[in-house]
Image (cartoon, rainbow, N blue to C red):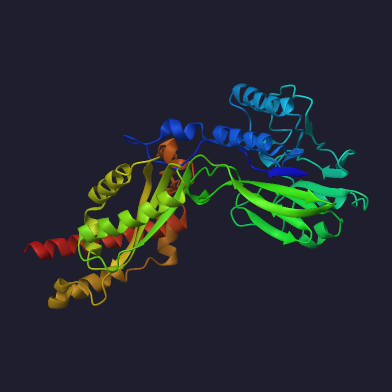
Amino acid sequence: MKFIHAADIHLDSALRGLERYEGAPVEEIRSATRRAFENLVQLAIDEQVGFVLLAGDLYDGDWRDYNTGLYFVGQMQRLHAASIPVFIVAGNHDAASQITKSLRLPDNVTLFSTRKPQSIILEDSGIAIHGQGFSTRAVTEDLSLGYPQGDAQLFNIGLLHTSLDGKPGHEPYAPCTVEGLRSKGYQYWALGHVHKREVISVDPWIVFPGNIQGRHIRESGPRGCTLVSVDNGAVSRVEHIDLDVMRWARCEVDVSACDSLDDLYETVRLRLQQNLDEADGRPVAVRIVLHGNTSLHSQLHAGMENLKQELRALCNGFGGAGMWLEKLSLKSAPAAGGDDIVNNDEALGGLLGIIRNLEVDGAAAASLLEEVAALGSKLPAELRSGDDSYDPADPQQLGEILEDVKELLVTRLLMTEGSD
């Protein structure tokens, strides 16, 4: 017998961070979560699984309209026609208090109680599935404590949306411990909430399958579900299956050895080709990060906009499924020994040194934050939301801006001196 364990579908969630420009895959990304979910349903049918487990965050909060719900019901009807049951626990994004619209689900779909743990016994296959969904968006208690002890005569599965013992970038909802889960005597724990795939334990199996489709640059790499095989009452195989229809990639390029822009473009091109090959025929949204000590440092910063357009064209020039620039990030530094101009001009070298060593003390920084805080409400909405949002009152972001200002001053001074 086989079953599928998936989580964090986030149906109709908007993919974020991709700049809008000519050739950007706006329509492609708009339907990405639906097409990835269709891949999940088709996998279940092709593998003739016994059932599908969805460990929370099926939706992405309250529906904008009924189309999201109607779409989900339609996909469940496909599984109903294939006699495949589906078992779901609500997560923090689709908690009962957040869903204001509801549709009658096909009778092959079971939504676990949000009031207390519920156990469902599949007599024909000797399987018990235990689960409880979120009744509110923020559940801070350990729901697993209320789950019953496993039946020694059955193959026991725990279906739970949880942060476990805490994961970076995820709210600490329904926290629990590995020891606590092991104490229940289950053979498999199907977890959700953490968007990165992780096998926590193999005795018993405790698995986060990750989400089925990356939605921004922090969710890069392959995304999918877990296909589990069970033989003679024990897990015999646990396999990750890719379901994503487009991929996010972070392309780190060391430009230390690049002596010209042509060298840099060729180095970047080779790394981008590698990212495209790894996507296995999927379109890729890529963030290019240039780092390393290079003699091109000042030239890159001075011509940032032109560099971005050149790299955007480089991405668009790939054939196949396509590649798009999500963002360009410059993390380079001057080549060891500094620029020749600095070495030959003691006064200029001293000035550049002062600029590079400028620091804002705590009191000055606090005063500056107060002055710029009011700017936040005047910024366009698209700059104040999303994963790369800008908050002028954020000390960390202010610090990064001050570093950029110092670099701009250095670059301008070098360009001015070089033209004399």
Please tell me which residue is depicted at 48% across the width and 32% down the height of the picture.
30
Across and down, in percent, residue 282 comes to 46, 42
The quadrant in which residue 136 appears is top right
Across and down, in percent, residue 391 comes to 45, 48
Q: Is residue 108 left or right of residue 306?
A: right
Please tell me which residue is depicted at 30% across the width and 59% down the height of the picture.
267
Q: Where is 235 relative to 341, above or below?
A: above
Residue 119 visible = yes
Look at the image and tell me in which quarter the N terminus lies: top right
Please tell me which residue is depicted at 69% across the width and 30% down the height of the picture.
99
Q: Is residue 24 left or right of residue 212?
A: left
The quadrant in which residue 255 appears is bottom left
- Find the residue positioned furthest to the left: 420
Across and down, in percent, residue 269 comes to 31, 54
Along the viewing direction, whichever of 268 and 58 lies nearer the viewer? 268
Q: Is residue 244 left or right of residue 348?
A: right
Across and down, in percent, residue 247 comes to 48, 45
Along the viewing direction, whichever of 271 and 373 lies nearer the viewer? 271
Please tell me which residue is depicted at 22% across the width and 62% down the height of the picture.
298
Look at the image and tell me in which quarter the C terminus lies: bottom left
Residue 166 visible = no
Q: How many marks?
A: 0
The quadrant in which residue 13 appears is top right
